[in-house]
Image (cartoon, coloured by chain):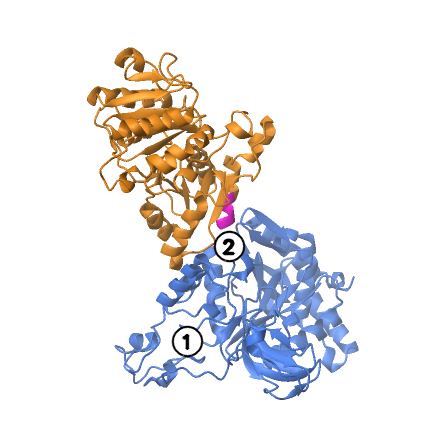
Chain colours: A blue, B orange
Amino acid sequence: MAEIVPMPKLGFDMTEGTLVRKAKQAGEAVAKGEILADIETDKATIEVEAYVGGVVTAWLVTEGQPVPIGTPMVVIAAPGETVDLTALGVSAGGVAKPSAPVPQATVSEATEATPAPSPTAPAPNAPASPIARKMAAEAGANLGLIPGTGPGGRITKKDVEAYLKATPAKPAAPVASVSVPSPVQREAAPRSAVDDTVVPLTKLRQIIARRMTESTTTTPQFYVTSEIDMGAAMDLRKQINALLPESGKVSVNDLIVKATGLALRQFPNLNATFAGDKVIHQGQVNVGVAVSVPGGLLTVVVKDSDQKALPHIAVEVKAMAGRARAGKVLASDIEGSTFSTSNLGMFDVANFIAIINPPEAAILATGAVREVAVIKNGAIIPAMRMSVTCSADHRVTDGAEVAQFLQAVKKNLEEPLRLML
Amino acid sequence: MAITTMAKAIAQAMAEEMERDSRIVVWGEEVAAAGGTYGATQGLQEKFGPTRVLDTPISEGVIVGAAVGAAMNGLRPIAEIMGINFAFLAMDQIINHAAKVRSMFGGQFECPIVIRTTSGGGRQLGATHSQTVEHLFAHFPGLLVVAPSTPGDAKGLLKAAIRSDDPVMFVEHATMYSDKGEAPEDVNYVLPIGKSDVKRSGKDVTIVTYSKMVSISLRAAQQLSAEGIECEIIDLRWLRPLDLEPVYESFKKTNRAVIVEEGYATYGLSAEIATRIYAECFDYLDAPIERVSQKEVPLPYSGPLEKYALPKVEDVIAGVKRVL
């Protein structure tokens, strides 16, 4: 019996995915558990395994074209089985060519990385109300890209409106002329085209742009800064690392993750999400760690940061950051963060302010541990200091609570045996 | 404008028209000396005398049959049938005679009669005396059917019915005679035939209804408004000729519709209206059209059960939420 494998849901807030690589071509055999495809989500590219074995009969989606989760993606049949796609209610994709050739714009950078979706061809099996179809057709939007929220996933007027609001208007499908300028060209034309380089946004950059704009425009954020004496923590780290193998050394950031995790357990209101008429205190303390990757950043997540031992955290973060930088991050690496941290200490940054990672309630930005002169008991002495700034959602919390939270973080780091308990 | 009751507005409309046109006569059971079962013919006999306002035997066939014959001979009778449930006894006179006279006699005769009757449940009168069946009469070409939702509309629509040269079923709701509302005192206040009326503006859902269900829908709309849902309510007024232009116009804006009728949905008014909306506004649909109607049982005598079976404010609210 042929199996229709849908676009998988690879993360809690994933609504669509893009097939970026077919690991098995049509006609090839695939075993259960073998890599079937690479799927790009909002956050990363993830290898997806086949959950049934058989022969790949037909790919139903086009590479590079995002489709809603649940969209039929590929058909896997038993060896020798004859499959009638029409009877299955699907149609083969990925081979259809637009009837008119897509013109190559004169500025090659201006063309989109993904093929332009055909505005007249809705995704197979995407139920949509007639008004939604009409509006999408008039706007030149591909229904296949619009997530449906109506009964049975039906795309309704509201969904199209939301989609059109979130997606800048695209020119209608090019007919035959190459003179239709893309929006980028129009903007670039009057300026000195000789010196400018147009850099199209990568998928990751688009996501960051959208989420950070959402955060700063919808969240009243305020900032509280504190300074932490890191002397004892640095000494302890040295002692621990002397006992650990090279591959498992604990970083300053690991200390911060642990100290933050413990403090969040005491301050559930900062390990939280604002939800309109209520605040949800997350049951788990999962501290996210921002990792710089080519073209952007990803937040890898240490689940149960408050409960894991430091060496455990160290190994986990190292593995996840490695995968993130290599573009091989797992869905589980980047899911479920309840509070984020961002550390620019390695760049000798004294302090900075981070933007809250929605839907979290706060984020902690840490600078470098610097050797500075401090006055203690009337004498100038050398000390190790680190500046931390917490950005918090004022709908959820207030300055006093954040200050007390920072005191707890500070205490955990200044009396670092607490991190070992 | 003066505030009056539905019963008084109806009596007023007849009195004004009888004053204007001496061919208008009124007859039915207890309409003369008693002034009507619901008081809607109060004072007419005193004013216009026993030759123009007269009681009939308890025979619906006679009441309508005599009206048809009188109309063919030049009078303009207003025949009252106490309840629409009894109109079944006059079905032959209404459907085979009144509705057919103009076309079957090639225009040589007209049948300018008004059959005033009451419809609707809600008074614990049992299954045979509580039916909402005016749409059955709207099935037949040649017969006009109108059912007002306010005293003001009742006055303007009854005057339009009386002035019509075609037979009109004028269907009053049995529980609305003491409803109060404004009614213009102008003797020339006549509402157009075959025009529906927007009773409330809104952008989210179109409610199509008539008669008593207009007030039920208005109450539902008020509650929904508190939740941020704005309903547009269209009062059909006339079941035939049916004017759905304002409905289409509204639907193209809201893309969602709920049809509220007091009668049964099966083979009912809502089926007709929904079909027409689907045909006319197909590209504007955002959700299947919903129907709110009476439970499909002979209406129970028991008060709580009767209440349960008839469409209520909560049913309309639930219907609206189903399309959102």
Instruction: Say which quadrant the C terminus of chain A sits in.
Output: bottom right
Q: The residue tagged with tag 1: helix, strand or loop? A: loop
Q: Which residue is mark 2?
A: A222
> Which residue is at a point 46% across and 83% down the rendered structure image?
A96
First reached walking from the N terminus: tag 2 or tag 1: 1
Q: Real-space Cα distance between discs 2 and 1?
A: 44 Å
Measured from the top left, where is residue A254 in percent x and y?
68, 69
Mark 2 — on which chain does it sit? A
Q: Which residue is mark 1?
A: A118
Mostly what secondary structure, the magenta segment? helix
- Mark 2 or 1: in front is 1
Measured from the top left, where is residue A2 in percent x and y?
65, 78
Is B164 in front, or is A221?
B164
Indicate the amino acid at tag 2: Phe
B14 relative to A134, above or below: above
Q: Are marks 2 and 1 in contact (CB under 8 Å)?
A: no
Please say whether residue A48 is one of the residues in the magenta stretch: no
> Which residue is at a point 27% across and 19% down the rendered structure image?
B15
In this rendering, do the residues under marks 2 and 1 share a single chain? Answer: yes
Label 2 environment density (alpha carbons within 10 Å; few <14, some 14–19, many ≥20):
some
Q: Quadrant of residue A361?
A: bottom right
Please say whether residue B322 is one of the residues in the magenta stretch: yes
> Which residue is at a point 58% across and 47% down the rendered structure image?
A278
Indicate the amino acid at tag 1: Ser
> Which residue is at a point 70% across and 73% down the rendered structure image?
A316
Q: Quadrant of residue A368?
A: bottom right
- Is residue A280 in sight in this rendering? yes
- Is residue A370 in sight in this rendering? no
Q: Which residues are magenta?
A: B319-324
